[in-house]
Amino acid sequence: MKENESKSKGSKKTRLFIIVIAAAIAIGIASAVVLAKITIQNPEDADDPRTVFWRHIHGLGIDPSDRNILYIATHGDFYQSVNGGPPVKVDEQRADYMAFNAPYAQGVPLYASGHPATGGNTGLIKSTDGGKTWQQVATVLDPPVDFHAMGVSKSDPNLIIGFDSAGRGLFKTIDAGQNWQTLQFPEYVSALAISPSDPNAVFAGTGKG
């Protein structure tokens, strides 16, 4: 009887040991999968070491000539997602694409501002090839402006209004960046939009509304 009880206890201990080992292995595998996923998403381990975590997004937009193309402007690179697929880096050099505005119609450039990888501010920049290359349109000020809030008119894409992140002014151009005028503003502007039906109506978001 005692021998049977001893065998029973030994069998229970063995089963418990097996369960514990199996649980430890399962946890280890799950942890490895999570760590592998994090490692894959870590920009330092990406094929392009300049690429930053694409989820830090400054702006989104749809290509007017192909509604299956989504533009993604981030803090370090410019991406496209086609047919809902994963974002693919398309810009040839790294930059910070602040205040991104996607075109409303074909033939209108993509506009942004921000910072180049070399430092400083970009001023107003544009792309006519889907974000692959970018050209400086205007510095507006010296040193160049850094628009964190900017609006491009839907009815008149030559009309652009931007607010410099350093608080140096609210600026307006009616000739796509060739000439600028300074506008009055009540306080720091964090968001801008121009009415699609009335280019004279501008909406600004501030810390007080």
Image: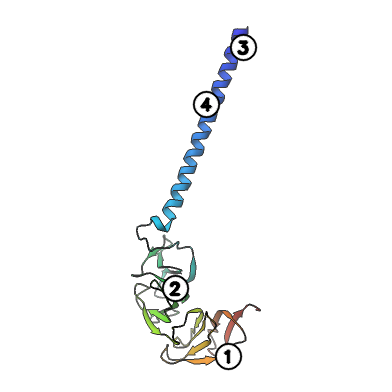
Q: Give the label on residue 167, or none.
A: none
Secondary structure of the residue carrying tag 4 is helix
143 relative to 41, above or below: below
Q: Mark 2 is on which residue type?
A: Tyr
Q: In this orientation, which residue lies closer to the viewer: 117 or 207?
A: 117
Residue 140 is situated, as x and y percent measured from the top left of the image, at 44, 87
Q: Are marks 3 and 2 in contact (CB under 8 Å)?
A: no
Q: Reading the chain from its start, which is encountered first: label 4 or label 1?
A: 4
The residue indicated by pointer 3 is: 5
The local crowd at label 1, few if under 14, some if 14 to 19, many if 20 or more residues have their Cα within 10 Å, is few
Q: Quadrant of the C terminus?
A: bottom right
The residue indicated by pointer 2 is: 97
Calculate the distance from the C-alpha at mark 3 to the C-alpha at mark 4.
20 Å
Q: Reading the chain from its start, which is encountered first: label 4 or label 2?
A: 4
Calculate the distance from the C-alpha at mark 1 to the C-alpha at mark 3.
91 Å
Secondary structure of the residue carrying tag 1 is loop
